[in-house]
Structure formats: C-alpha cells, structure tokens
Image: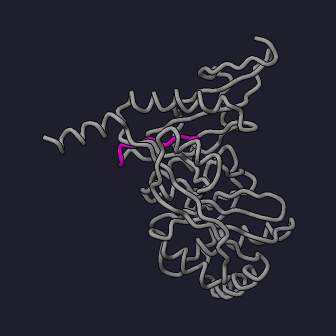
Amino acid sequence: MSNNDVAVREPWPDEMFRVQHFLRGPFLFDAKPFVLVAVMGRVERFIGIVALSDRPLQHLRSSWLNLRVLNQHVVGQELMRRAMEEAWKRDTRAVYFSQTVRADSPQAEALQAIGFEQSAVHEVYEVDARPLFERIDRIYQRMRMRNSFPPDVELTTLQRSLVSKVRSFLRENLPGSASTLAQETAGYKAEHSIALLQNGEIKGVVLGRRRGNVGHTGLRVVAKELRGGSGWANLLMLHTTLSSGLQTGLEITRFEFNPELHHDTQQFAALHGARLVARRLLLRANNPAKKETAESAQQV
C-alpha cells in the first residue's frame, strides 16, 4: 500500500483499543458492534471508522450507526454503504444515524441523498455557566446542610475500567428512544464525563465534551430508583460538572434535547433563561425491503 492508498476492512483484534479510542460512543452500549475501519498508507493510519449496533435499539428492531471520518474524507461514503448493507442483511427495520446533524449542513444533505429522512428535531440551548452554577450551588449547599446526600456516594471521571459497568447501567436505565440515544453520545470525552457511584454501583452518568470555554452536556441518565423526589443525584452531577468546569475556564454550557419528549429539560431551559442556538435533525433510513413489503400489503 502506498502512502496515499486507502483500504476499508474489518479491524484486527490488536487494533480494538485504537478503534475504541477513535470512536467511543458505540462501545458504551455494545461490547462487540459490527466495525469497519478505513486505513491509509503503509502504517495503516485510521482515517475513518463506522460501527453498527443492534443492542441500543433492539426493542425497536432498529440499528444504530456511528461514523467518524477525518477531514470529511470521501471514504465515509464507502463506510456508510457497507454498514447499510450489513444492516439490511440483519433484516433491521431502520437505521438511525447516531449523531444529530444541523438541518442546513453538508452532512445532512449527504445523508439524505442516500435515503435518510428526518425522524425528529432536537433543540440546542446554551446558558452562562457562572450564573447557573451560583443558582445550583445555593440549592446544593442547603441540601448538604440537611444531609440530603448519602454518605456512600462517589463521583469520578469516566475511566476505562468503568466502561463495562456503565454499559450495563445504560442498557437498564436509558429511556428507550433514539432521540435520547442520539444526544451527542458519539462526541463524548472521558475526561469531561462523570459517573456517580453509590456503594460501588453506577447510579448516574453524564456524557459531555468541551471545546475551549464551551461545554456540551450530551446525555444525563440517573438510575430509575433515584428519579423524582429531591432529585439529589441529578443535582449532585450537575453541581460537580459545573464546578470542575469553571475551575478550568468554562463560560458557556450547552445541552440538546427533543422538546416533544423531554419536557423537564425544556422547563429547565426556560427557568434558567437558556438561549436557543441551533436545531438539529435526528435522521433515520428505513429498510427498503420492509417499505416495499408494506406498500405491497396496502395494494392488496
């Protein structure tokens, strides 16, 4: 292979650590997704990876497709084509693209050109981090004085040793919608994400990423038994992420949600004066064979 040659293949077993570092999202939900890598040059440098998994959306009989390509390389088209072929071989009803995309972006146009359609519209809001933290901190201090936080609680960054536990936790506690799954989980950074443990067990997860002074909270999930009530788990994770972020120059925090599903997040945005900054599309491609079958049934 010359320095400019590109090849698409399945990864070798000893490459899986690099694969999971290059594309983290799917491995939080599936230990062994279908994976193809695009490599370039004699040293076979990764320039793209696609991962297809049935686990996160198996209750919908649908697949979840993750893609990362460096510098928008054209090999992304080949990775997508082969991943979609694999999905249809599995007789999946539909394929959801893992990340939401801006409606007017080249990425959205490219996906729609190969058969993806709008499934939902997400909204992205931002709020100034310092005023938000000050309001949250007042509530946090009152709860701490009342001993509202259990003593056996620990918060830690999303270390590699926790991934298998986080995977089990998300399977059990993640609300079963593609919208929730698509809230930028593919873009999370381990150092900007946290896990809440109680007595050594995962009870909450926040997936986030950071670029300069802007932080993006993609997904926040709390164990079913800790939802409602005082909401101490959610508050503790929010307080921790804001506090640590402000110490390293965080000025703006952003979050994404589907307003048709996440009414509590919409109320949070209104309560704290968050600003709407973007609308993003959740895209889905329906199995053409399933569509033809449905159309034939209607004609009969």
In the image, the segment drawn in magenta is 60-66
Is the residue 44 above or below the residue 64 in the image?
above
Q: Quadrant of the N terminus?
A: top right
Residue at the location (48% across, 44% down)? 116
Q: Residue furthest left?
A: 300
Residue 62 magenta-highlighted: yes
- Residue 279 figure quarter: bottom right
Residue at the location (66% across, 63% down)? 217
- Residue 148 figure quarter: bottom right
Q: Nearer the viewer, residue 270 or 118?
A: 118
Q: Where residue 241 appears, x then y in whole percent?
A: 72, 67
- Residue 21 figure quarter: top right
Number of disc labels:
0
Residue at the location (52% across, 32% down)? 32
Q: Nearer the viewer, residue 250 or 283?
A: 283
252 sits left or right of 175 in the view? right
Q: Where residue 153 appears, x then y in whole percent?
A: 63, 66
